[in-house]
């Protein structure tokens, strides 16, 4: 199953060879946004002037005969989650707290995207401050799943996932703290990659949980995912937690025919199936798709092994302590003193201003997590909660390290279920939290993980995502395995039928 | 019992927390300039305002300075150190947490020995960032102001907080300890040590206990002392307050108290500062720092001379008295001039005398530091040499020095241009002295009848008549000759 919509690499090639201008590419994508975003509501703001200026710059280079100097993906439109700072654009984090906040600086990933002359079409919706798994916790409006608009696109990077899925762009950036890119990628039938912690700079990403956050791309193919990773990866002097190698590998080369054989250096691929994703809590369709995925790997000549990871399922408890503790601290800066919402009328004193500003500016889910996190760090509780959670994190890392002795890649469903209906989990935060059970461990131990389509649920017709996890810094191998699987399963560049009519010419 | 007798029943126990503001070029976690006296919020970057998405990057220069301070205080230097968030809401704290160090400070235990032999143990010294500054509009302080402004120029400035054990036993010891730390950081070149401008601050933990009692009394933490004098006064006042409470059967409350300079008393801060739970936790934005032994050794190898080392050297290498050496050590810039001048003159005692006498006097009047004058060590050295050769008298020196400080130049040249060349011509002087003797027959007679003190009168008149240029020794001889004739 494939669509006629071009991929990001195809667009880049068309622009570079002069068969299409970057401005025309941008026109067609804005036309798609115009046509579809009324229904999907993926965007919080558009950025036409800046985007067209960038496209014009690319076209000028091509016209002047300098197409050979174009950087990778030049002229390819991209959408950005609204928790990444882009100079001169609003960065709301889908919160009332930052409703009118205009950023005065670029996140490092944005600087890189600008250096690659990629037009930034707009900023996308998310659960407020990236806290949620459905995109319903946006303070502005929900985003709808292109495969079924009664369903959520997943979250928190739901806007960035939905706009790629509906073909409004070929690429977007999200952020993944506990699955916020992989889970919506899974629910929207596209590819989402959370890189190794430190591979991509966090500078300019509004922090949710600093030790877990990682800027992460969406695309509709593994090849495009590799290309955008090539653009955004790299060590950054502005981020002390970034630690990428000084010379980046060629990720684009990893997502090609034959790259898996190169990566494995003649050895057989060893695939580990994470135990615990059968039966209760896992949808039948999802389970079936994973079973078929295992067969595909066998077809690729892989050795299959079941792996029981100590603490994999318990990781969710540790995660909700660590993530909320860090969030409670990271979000303390929103106090009404310097920027953003500030409640000043009728306040008794500055503490009253803090309280009223925060009471009004934050939504219920954000408040819930700030309270949880503040409690976890309180005197007398620190050891029992935060200390223990960090210990669980270490145990989990050890069990992963053990697993890497036996397998090259670990697989499991990205999400226990396909996209759920809007409102379905609203009154049940625990159930919402549990939808991240498979994705959270990769954030806790900092390893790269990728979700890509592996099938469709027969009951609902909704896409199902498979998660692949590899050791830290092995993005090349991850992309090679994902590419081989993508080609074997034949699910790539998926766009739901309702969004295929409007063409993009190359 | 009188007050003194009552107070003598108690032993004073003091510990100090000294904040040293490091003079690094940029802030502790930001590239913004670490500089003061600029327009409000001029020296700020995204990190200083805690803009969403901003991340701290540790300043290696600040880490090096902190290691220097640690080595200067004889502290153990940590091989592993990390940063933690200390969380509380206040408008001058942009992130609503201060990046500080909780359980792994950069410097561990050290020790300082006071002049009376008392050893003050240092518990730790850690790096942390400063907060911004509130400016209350419409009143001197918060009370009565219409609104407050916040200036983040200071926000993120690097501080080393040096925490002592409660080892001091008098306000004098506390003051000396503070002065010693000030001198050490100034010698290290990491801080100007200016208390009034806030580049050094201290909080004092004060408690009292009856002599012989093993347990410490309940302490109060005194804040807002911004001079050596206020440190002494605040401690004195707090000790009196605590003794009065204990004597009347009351209990001292553990709390923070603010020193009120105008009222001369400490005031409770409890209303403002409830028992805080700072919810410390490791800052996930800052990777822990592993300090290599080789780095510490490189810093140790380039460690500047410390005050006690200089003092000893001044006595040993230059033959100065202990008193002179201590003055030239305490006033570091004078000592620096002295040492620079010794490259051009071996008249060490004379150099020291000029620096501590005439020059200090002029500097006090002009309210200047020596390095703000035009005086060069070379010129000072020449003056000392000329003095030793008796080509310059103290009277001539008094005329030369103000010019040397204001306009610069070598004394040999100035003597010519100002017409201050010493009058040593015997014949010329004889004529002048003869005139003075002739004009004062009464004094001559009185001198001859035994009033020896009048000798000084004739010398003085001669010096006056020569505008101080006459060689004093020659004048002495000639006046004696004239009077005894």
Image (cartoon, coloured by chain):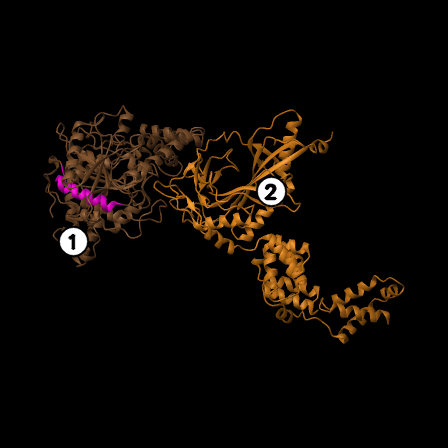
Q: Position of residue A178 (x, y in %)?
A: 29, 35
The mark found on residue A199 in the picture is: none
In the drawing, does residue B212 fall left or right of residue A298? Answer: right
Magenta span of residues: A474-495
Question: Please, which chain is the residue tagged with disc 2 on?
Answer: B
In the drawing, does residue A67 fall left or right of residue B93? Answer: left
* Residue that numbered label 1 is attached to: A16
Q: Is residue A482 magenta?
A: yes
Few, some or many C-alpha atoms within 10 Å of disc 1 (few <14, some 14-19, many ≥20)?
many
Name the dominant secondary structure of the magenta segment. Answer: helix
Q: Is residue A204 above or below residue A354?
A: below
Identify the image quadrant of residue B422: bottom right
Q: Position of residue A148 (x, y in %)?
A: 15, 30
Tell me the distance, in whole angstroms, between the alpha carbons under discs 1 and 2: 72 Å
Looking at the image, which is closer to me, B234 or A10? A10
Can residue B248 be seen at all in this image of the molecule?
yes
SS of the residue under disc 2: strand
The mark found on residue B120 in the picture is: 2
In the drawing, does residue A188 fall left or right of residue B183? Answer: left
Residue at 80% across / 70% down in the picture?
B477
In the picture, one chain is brown; tell me its letter. A
In the picture, one chain is orange; tell me its letter. B
Question: Please, which chain is the residue tagged with disc 1 on?
Answer: A
Q: Are marks 1 and 2 on the same chain?
A: no
């Amino acid at each position: 199953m494939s669509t006629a919509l071009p991929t990001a690499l195809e667009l880049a090639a068309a622009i570079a060879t002069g068969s299409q201008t970057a401005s025309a590419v941008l026109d067609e994508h804005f036309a798609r946004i115009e046509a579809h975003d009324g229904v999907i509501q993926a965007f919080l703001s558009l950025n036409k002037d800046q985007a067209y200026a960038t496209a014009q710059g690319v076209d000028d280079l091509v016209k002047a005969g300098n197409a050979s100097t174009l950087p990778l993906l030049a002229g390819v439109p991209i959408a950005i989650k609204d928790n990444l700072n882009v100079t001169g654009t609003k960065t709301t984090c889908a919160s009332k707290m930052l409703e009118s906040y205009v950023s005065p600086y670029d996140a490092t990933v944005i600087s890189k995207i600008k250096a690659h002359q990629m037009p930034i079409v707009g900023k996308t919706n998310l659960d407020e401050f990236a806290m949620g798994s459905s995109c319903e916790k946006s303070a502005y409006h929900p985003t709808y799943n292109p495969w079924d608009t009664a369903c959520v696109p997943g979250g928190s990077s739901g806007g960035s996932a939905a706009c790629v899925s509906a073909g409004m762009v070929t690429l977007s950036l999200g952020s993944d703290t506990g699955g916020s890119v992989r889970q919506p990628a899974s629910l929207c039938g596209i590819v989402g990659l959370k890189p190794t912690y430190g591979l991509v700079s966090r500078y300019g990403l509004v922090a949710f949980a600093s030790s877990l956050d990682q800027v992460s791309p969406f695309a509709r193919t593994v090849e495009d995912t590799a290309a955008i990773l090539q653009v955004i990866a790299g060590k950054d002097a502005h981020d002390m937690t970034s630690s990428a190698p000084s010379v980046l590998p060629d990720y684009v080369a990893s997502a090609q025919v034959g790259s898996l054989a190169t990566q494995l250096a003649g050895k057989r691929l060893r695939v580990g199936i994470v135990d615990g994703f059968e039966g209760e809590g896992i949808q039948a369709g999802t389970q079936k798709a994973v079973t078929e995925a295992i067969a595909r790997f066998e077809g690729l000549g892989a050795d299959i092994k079941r792996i029981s990871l100590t603490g994999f399922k318990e990781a969710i408890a540790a995660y909700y302590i660590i993530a909320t503790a860090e969030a409670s601290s990271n979000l303390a800066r929103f106090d009404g003193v310097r920027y953003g919402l500030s409640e000043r009328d009728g306040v008794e004193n500055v503490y009253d201003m803090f309280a009223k500003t925060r009471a009004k500016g934050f939504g219920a889910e954000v408040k819930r997590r700030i309270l949880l996190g503040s409690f976890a760090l309180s005197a007398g509780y620190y050891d029992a909660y935060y200390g223990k959670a960090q210990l669980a994190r270490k145990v989990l890392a050890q069990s992963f390290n053990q697993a890497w002795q036996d397998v090259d890649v670990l697989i499991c469903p990205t999400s226990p279920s396909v996209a759920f209906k809007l409102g379905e989990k609203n009154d049940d935060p625990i159930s919402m939290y549990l939808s991240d059970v498979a994705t959270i461990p990769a954030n806790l131990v900092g390893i790269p993980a990728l979700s890509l389509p592996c099938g469709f649920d027969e009951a609902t017709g909704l896409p199902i995502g498979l998660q692949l996890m590899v050791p830290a810094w092995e993005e090349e191998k991850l992309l090679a395995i994902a590419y081989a699987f993508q080609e074997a399963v034949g699910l790539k560049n998926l766009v739901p039928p309702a969004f295929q009519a409007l063409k993009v010419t190359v | 019992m009188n007050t003194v007798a009552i107070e003598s029943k108690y032993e004073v126990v003091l510990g100090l927390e000294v904040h040293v503001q490091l003079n690094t070029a940029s802030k502790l976690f930001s590239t913004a300039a670490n500089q003061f006296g600029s327009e409000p919020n001029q020296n700020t970057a995204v990190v200083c305002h805690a803009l969403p998405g901003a991340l701290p990057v540790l300043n290696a220069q600040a880490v090096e300075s902190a290691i220097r301070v640690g080595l200067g205080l004889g502290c153990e230097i940590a091989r592993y150190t990390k940063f933690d968030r200390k969380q509380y809401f206040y408008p001058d704290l942009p992130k609503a947490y201060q990046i500080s160090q909780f359980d792994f400070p950069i410097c561990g235990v050290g020790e300082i020995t006071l002049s009376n032999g008392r050893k003050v143990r240092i518990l730790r010294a850690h790096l942390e960032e400063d907060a911004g500054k509130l400016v209350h509009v419409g009143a001197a302080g918060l009370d009565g102001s219409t609104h407050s402004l916040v200036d983040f120029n200071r926000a993120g400035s690097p501080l080393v907080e040096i925490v002592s054990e409660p080892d001091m036993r008098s306000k004098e010891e506390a003051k000396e300890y503070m002065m010693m730390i000030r001198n050490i950081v100034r010698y290290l070149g990491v801080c100007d040590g200016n208390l009034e401008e806030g580049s050094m601050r201290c909080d004092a933990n004060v408690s009292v206990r009856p002599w012989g009692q093993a347990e410490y009394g309940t302490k109060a933490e005194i804040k807002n002392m911004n001079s050596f004098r206020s440190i002494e006064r605040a401690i004195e006042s707090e000790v009196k307050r605590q003794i009065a409470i204990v004597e009347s059967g009351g209990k001292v409350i553990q709390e923070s108290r603010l020193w009120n300079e105008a009222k001369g008393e400490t005031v409770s801060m409890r209303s403002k500062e409830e028992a805080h739970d700072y919810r410390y936790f490791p800052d996930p934005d800052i990777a822990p720092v592993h300090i290599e032994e080789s780095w510490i050794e490189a810093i140790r190898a380039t460690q500047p001379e410390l005050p006690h080392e200089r003092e000893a050297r001044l006595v040993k290498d230059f033959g100065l008295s202990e008193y002179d050496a201590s003055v030239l050590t305490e006033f570091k810039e004078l000592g620096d001039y002295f040492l620079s001048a010794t490259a051009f003159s071996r008249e060490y005692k004379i150099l020291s005398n000029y620096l501590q006498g005439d020059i200090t006097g002029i500097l006090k009047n002009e309210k200047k530091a020596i390095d703000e004058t035009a005086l060069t060590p070379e010129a000072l050295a020449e003056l000392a040499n000329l003095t030793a050769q008796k080509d310059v008298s103290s009277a001539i020196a008094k005329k030369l020095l103000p010019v040397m400080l204001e306009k610069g130049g070598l004394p040999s040249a100035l003597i010519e241009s100002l017409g201050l060349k010493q009058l040593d011509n015997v014949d010329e002087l004889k004529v002048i002295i003869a005139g003075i003797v002739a004009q004062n027959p009464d004094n001559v007679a009185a001198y001859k009848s035994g009033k020896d003190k009048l000798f000084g009168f004739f010398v003085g008149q001669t010096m006056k008549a020569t505008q101080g240029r006459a060689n004093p020794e020659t004048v002495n001889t000639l006046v004696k000759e004239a009077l005894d004739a």
